[in-house]
Image (cartoon, helix red, strand yellow):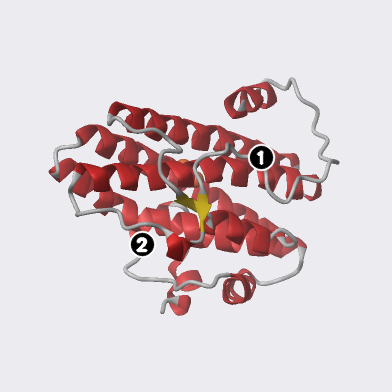
Amino acid sequence: MSRRLARAWAEGRLTWRLDVAPPDRPAHPPEPALLPPHAMPKRGKAGSPRARIALIHALAHIEFTAIDLAWDLVARFGAGCPRAFADDWVRIAAEESLHFLWLSARLEMLGSRYGALPAHDGLWESAQATAGDLIARLSVVPLVLEARGLDVTPQTAERLRTAGDAISAGMLERIYRDEIGHVGAGVRWLHWACESANMTVDSAFERSVRLYFKGQIKPPFNVEARNLAGFSENLYQGLAS
Ligand SMILES: [Fe+2]
Ligand SMILES: [Fe+2]
């Protein structure tokens, strides 16, 4: 449905009218069960088939939530932004949908399926915490959480490849390239939102992260990928724990 909607938007078959309040949380399937992050079961011995399925399941859930996050940006904030904002996040919703479908198919190849394990709800909690403020949402979701994905994904892909799982590794590498674009969109729209609100990007970003992000900003950073996304080091280095 997500990809069909994105295609209809790209082909100009939808009207740019965003006047319906989005729900606090979108509908989701009965499974996976959503648990608080600390209640998640252990993934099993590193390198075991069980641990690999748990890893891919966790990543599939991140992508599933990322679909919702992209549409939520459009529905919740799109009316106050130029049309190009909707163009960007609709396209990103379609990419997140593909990422989810790949990982979901991979789980089935490995004898599991999306929903077979519990998942944690941390990502959507960050969305709810920032539902009233576009600058906070962009700071925390694309620029802390998705940017964190850029820091860790290359090593995860490498580990999978070393363990003999070239298929999952290839999916992660492709996802990684798309995610650089998502962080890039986050940077561009953060700049736009700060300019519209007459705020400096540095202080708005720092303030949002301190107020709304409860975790730690952990180095080492993938500075090369972050630079490709236009995410300048002086925005985040000072926040590193
Ligand atoms: Fe993704
Ligand atoms: Fe993404």
The secondary structure type at the circle numbered 2 is helix
Picture residue at 19% right of the left edge, 37% below the top: 165
- For residue 27, the mark is 1
Q: Disc 2 residue type?
A: Val
Picture residue at 74% right of the left edge, 20% below the top: 13
Find residue 17 and report its image quarter: top right
Find residue 148 and report its image quarter: bottom left
Find residue 85 and report its image quarter: top right
**In this rendering, position of residue 69 left or right of residue 182:** right
Identify residue for label 2. Answer: 223
**Image quadrant where one finds the N terminus:** top right
Q: Nearer the viewer, residue 131 or 53?
A: 53
**Mark 1 CB lies closer than 8 A to ligand 1:** no
Residue reaching furthest right? 19
In the rendered image, is residue 117 in sight?
yes
Q: Disc 1 residue type?
A: Ala
The secondary structure type at the circle numbered 1 is loop
